[in-house]
Amino acid sequence: MLEKIANRIKITEKALDAAWLRNEAISQNIANVDTPGYKRKTVEFEKYLDGALDGFKLKGNVSNEKHIPIGRIDAEKLEIKAVSDNRGLDYRIDGNNVDIDNEMASLAKNTIRYNMLVETLNAGLRRIKSAISEGRR
Amino acid sequence: MGYLDSIDIGASALTAQRLRMDIISQNIANINTTRTDKGTPYRRKLVVFEERSPSAPFSTYLSESSKKIIGKGVRVARIAEDESPFKKIYEPGHPDADENGYVFMPNVDIVAEMVDMISATRAYEANVTSINSAKDMAMKTLQIGK
């Protein structure tokens, strides 16, 4: 049970890392809104998480440490990747594909997501604390 | 990925946009200047922005962490001069008029400068917002485990 919560905390940690890096990418995009030829940067994480979740329906029991875990997300293997987005080249004459309104919206979204993830993480930690104190407070 | 890199990125953009604003002010201030050190009327100046690439050691590019390289913000590569022709106006009484009574005026377009100024202000504000959000996130991080 504790292991389950611990794994969930690890995944949340990864998601927090991704949100942090994404904030950096959005800051970089906003900073370079007037730089000719600049290509916006994005962070890929959710699609890797989705890919990991796809195998979630089938569950395998792990009775030996050498078993490959089936249906459990291995938090260590989740990828976070910063990539350049080359789409939307015809948006502006100077070859820059940053849309400032889009970036501001993403910034707000990302901050809210980060706060939400911190709350999730805290809830997980509180549960462990509660278990340690045998449910008394 | 360094801790609080987002704030440095935002700050670099604030510096760049402020310099852009200084140059715009210089252009507007010199809209009627017919004499400079070079002997020509004032030429419109403009800033050239450039992305500040990450200054990571080579070993970083070989390792896992190369996936997390974002960049270091923006910087002003150089201050260029607008090479478009000067405006020629007829004003025989002007001390800098040629024998036909024409004066060459700076190639500064006041409307373009005003629009540029608004654009610089908005970009500055956007970067202030991005710094604030990075700050909020960092403060929220301190709440983990509370």
Image (spheres, coloured by chain):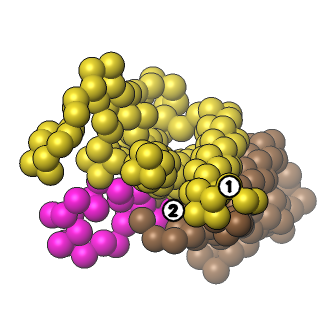
Chain colours: A yellow, B brown
Q: In which quarter of the image is the N terminus of chain B?
A: bottom left
Instruction: Give SS at disc 2.
Output: loop
Considering every residue shown, the one lying at the far top of the view is: A57
The disc label shown at residue B16, or none = none
Task: Say which of B144 and A124 sits in front.
Answer: A124
Residue B109: image x %, image y %?
Answer: 75, 46
Residue B145: tell me if it is visible.
Answer: yes
User: CA–CA distance between discs 2 and 1?
Assistant: 49 Å
Up-down relation of residue B78 to residue A65 (above or below): below
A81 with respect to A94 (left or right) = left
Up-down relation of residue B49 to residue A109 (above or below): below
Residue that badge 1 annotates: A135
The span shown in magenta is B53-74
Q: Quadrant of the C terminus of chain B?
A: bottom right
Residue at x 32%, y 38% (from the top left corner):
A73
Residue at x 45%, y 52% (from the top left corner):
A2
Residue B92: image x %, image y %?
Answer: 85, 55
Q: What residue type is labelled 1?
A: Gly
Residue at x 77%, y 43% (from the top left corner):
B115
Residue B135: tell me if it is visible.
Answer: no
Q: In this figure, what is the number of numbered marks? A: 2
Task: Say which of B117 and B83 sits in front.
Answer: B117
Up-down relation of residue A103 to residue B36 (above or below): above
Considering every residue shown, the one lying at the far left of the view is: A66
What chain is tagged by disc 2?
A: B
Q: Which amino acid does label 2 sit on?
A: Gly
Residue B71 within the magenta-colored segment of the rendering? yes
A45 with respect to A106 (left or right) = left
The disc label shown at residue B73, or none = 2
Instruction: Give SS at disc 1.
Output: loop
